Amino acid sequence: MNKATIKDVALVAEVSVKTVSRVLNNEPNVRPVLQDRVHAAVKTLGFKRNPLARGLRGQQSFIITLLYSNPNPGYILELQNGALNRCIQEGYNLQIHPCDHNSADLISSIESIVQYSTQDGFILTHPLCDNKALTDLLDEKGIPFARISPFVHEHPSPYVYSNDEQAAFDMTNYLISLGHTKIGFIKGHPDFGASQKRFNGYQRALESVNIALDDNLIKQGLFTFESGESCARQLLNQAEKPTAIFASNDYMAAGVLKVSAQMKINVPAELSIVGYDDAPVSKQIWPSITTIKQPIYSIAEHAVEKLIRKIKKQPFDDIQTEFDCELVLRNSSSPCA
Amino acid sequence: MNKATIKDVALVAEVSVKTVSRVLNNEPNVRPVLQDRVHAAVKTLGFKRNPLARGLRGQQSFIITLLYSNPNPGYILELQNGALNRCIQEGYNLQIHPCDHNSADLISSIESIVQYSTQDGFILTHPLCDNKALTDLLDEKGIPFARISPFVHEHPSPYVYSNDEQAAFDMTNYLISLGHTKIGFIKGHPDFGASQKRFNGYQRALESVNIALDDNLIKQGLFTFESGESCARQLLNQAEKPTAIFASNDYMAAGVLKVSAQMKINVPAELSIVGYDDAPVSKQIWPSITTIKQPIYSIAEHAVEKLIRKIKKQPFDDIQTEFDCELVLRNSSSPCA
DNA sequence: AACACCATTGATAACGATGTCAGTTTATTT
DNA sequence: AAATAAACTGACATCGTTATCAATGGTGTT
């Protein structure tokens, strides 16, 4: 019943506990014969090292905390799964910590988890990774971290991101290639750096084909369904209607879809609508929404990998890693009539 | 920089480490004077007990693992947040472990996490909690667990659930009260016990007003958008069309909405559609979907509470706790024309 | 006054792993 | 063959906490 300890292994393998430890940690200078004996004993006993004991002795916990503040459940779950997968591979555990990036006591709440439970490092997601007070806190405590999609880059910690600007550029170009010239844009919440990047991509695409930016076609949204709805009303109630609308996320695109339905505007025949994020709703709505899929799972995996290297003080190739997004063409977009 | 240990506290409070430990663990027989000294020392040093050392010595990890296999991101996140909240309150950490309930090596994968990392208990969610092989494994290893929404109840471990049958009964009655008599039903995935319960509620409601069950109005879905779509096609392409459709979850209801749009059936004027789960999509679609909201957060909190009592071998009032669901009336349902 | 009893306290050993360091082989050099 | 270097091995201390158990002192009983 009771789990085997390193002592039991030593007994069975007829070596000292230290030698067992050496084998388990791939330390050099152990005779192959003994290595085999140890491995055999480990196998017959079904031995697994006790992470608590390891952590206590080595002053580490093998725990990585994923910090997020994001209203998109699909995104978070993908992130968790990717991070978790790499953590398990590396023998780490993942601790999750949802929080509110607007909350006044964000810092104190994180300070308390830093004290209560020990963690070897943090993964900071957007927009938390741009919170100076937070990064200062972690720096001060000497806790390593990796960032996902930061907007501000001036920190020596590694970060991973997807090329939002390029993706938005590509999407806008796709709409242009369908013949659209009056393309509305609904910006994301200003707290998120991604909002700016997506808008930049849109802007750059229009400039590249010499379409002048039209302020009447650009509205400020908040990443919510309701904000998409209200921006759509503004966009579609003016004389010069757009023939396509690019919403900075799928929730807002869904809001545009609602307004179109209410105004009896046929999508995509009369109005193309595209979103961003490949949120579940984009598939669960009719017409399904053309959107952009970020490789969130891979991004999370990679962030964990970089973080673990940082924790182990191993060198990593590059402080930053960029991932490409993918256009997902669905039924909400079509050539301009 | 280095964190204070119990030894430092003992030094400052001028007592032995054991006395500090006693105070921290609320053990009896320590003079109030010393208790105060210890508390003061803890405060000035900002001392927090090291969970690793505690766990190692006490043969426990203060970790609870949440096991889930569920395709609904919103549901999972609520579950996590509820469980996490109670865990933190109780001084535990939450470890998450997504898995596939259909996977052949489900058991071996769980066996490995049981060995690799130590956990004090498991929260099993639906439908994993009905997996005999899994519960047998945990029983054999002597690891306590609590279950969320089990279908099979024959186990002495505590469980928490929402009254799905009653909620489905209420929803069906709501449709009946709107004048509907031809009410279609799309069943959920047969692997999930909830599917059966929801169907039972529908059945009981019809019986209570003497409406005969019509097999042509009952279709087997799989909880996916696509399955909702295909069931809706079957339901709406027959001569005797239903005037209302009750889908066992919101994804399928969204599928019905798609088919209705394609068939130019006006929702809710010509067809009322209701779902279940209060998934994000139910708000992000037009018309928004009338649905049922389970108090998932509370359910998760309560499951953790019961589990911790079980771990600490404290008595709990009742092995089961039932929570009520709530009807959320939105725009996809209206009186029968 | 002697005794038992109980509340209070602390010295020390565990928990299961890894780091230090010294001792014992074995290989290499002369 | 002797000297030296290198490879190998294990005894023991250590991480921060809690459990065991013995020692202390005060109270009440006879």
Image (cartoon, coloured by chain):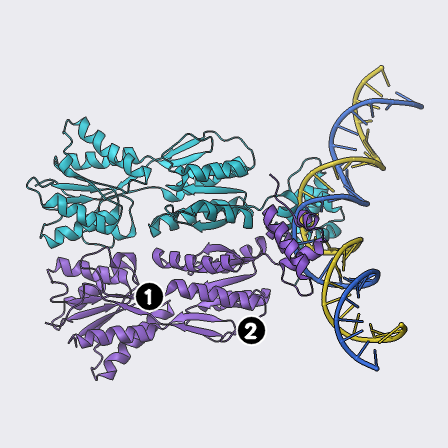
Chain colours: A purple, B cyan, C blue, D yellow
| A256, A291: nearer the viewer | A291
Tell me, for residue A315, which label it has, or none. 2
Residue B195 in the image: state x and y as whole percent.
28, 38
The residue that appears at 15% across and 61% down in the rendered structure is A260
Residue for badge 1: A189
Q: Position of residue C10 (x, y in %)?
A: 79, 44
Query: How many residues crowd around disc 2 within 10 Å: few (fewer than 14), some, or many (20 or more)?
Result: few
Please check whether the numbered discs 2 and 1 fall on a single chain.
yes
* Residue D3 horizontal/vertical position (percent): 88, 75
Circle 2 marks a residue in which chain? A
Q: Split into 4 quadrants, where in the image is the N terminus of chain B?
A: bottom right
Relative to B225, is B7 on the left or the right? Answer: right
Q: Name the residue at 42% across, 29% down.
A: B154
Q: Secondary structure at mark 2?
A: loop
Badge 1 marks a residue whose secondary structure is: loop
Judge by depth and name the residue closer to the eye, A260 or A240.
A260
Q: Nearer the viewer, residue B320 or B124?
A: B124
Name the image quarter holding the C terminus of chain B.
top left
Q: Position of residue A216 (x, y in %)?
A: 20, 74
